[in-house]
Amino acid sequence: MDIIRNMKYNKKKEGGNHMGYTDEDRKADFDFFIKNYQNFYKEYGHKFLAIKDKKVLGAYDSVTEIISDLTPTYEVG
């Protein structure tokens, strides 16, 4: 999970510009993950979760799968 926690996703905008994903945003998402860990574990088991803006973007079997699925919409940073 360290890899997922340390990944930041920036929503892609027109023309390649990106909205910033700040340290505060990252901390808020991490706190959301910790607060809801038991529920996430019950629902998703040992999956990798991609979380942004306190929303689960998806549950995946690998980091590679997350990157493949989400990079058309979100920048990995």
Image (tube, rainbow, N blue to C red):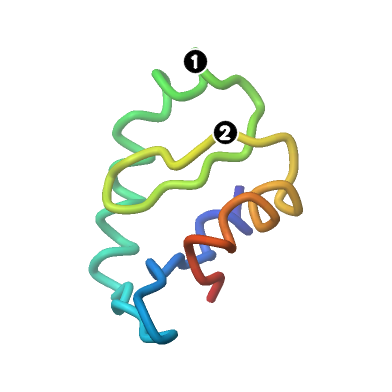
Q: Rounded to the nearest whole Å, what is the CA distance between mark 1 and mark 2?
A: 10 Å
Give residue 23's mark: none
Could you tell me which residue is drawn at 51 percent across and 21 percent down?
A: 41
Q: How far from the left and from the top, in percent, is residue 45?
A: 61, 20
Which one is in front, 43 or 58? 58
Q: How far from the left and from the top, in percent, is residue 60?
A: 65, 36
Which one is in front, 35 or 44? 44
Could you tell me which residue is drawn at 27 percent across and 52 percent down?
A: 53
Q: Mark 1 is on which residue type?
A: Glu
State the residue position of label 1: 43
Pointer 2 local density, CA inside 10 Å: few below 14, some 14–19, many at least 20: some
Quarter occupied by residue 9: bottom left
View extreme (front): residue: 14
**Does 14 sit above or below residue 67?**
below
Could you tell me which residue is drawn at 40 percent across and 86 percent down?
A: 15
Quarter occupied by residue 21: bottom left
Give the mark nearest the N terminus, 1 or 2. 1
Which one is in front, 46 or 75? 75
Which one is in front, 34 or 70? 70
State the residue position of label 2: 59
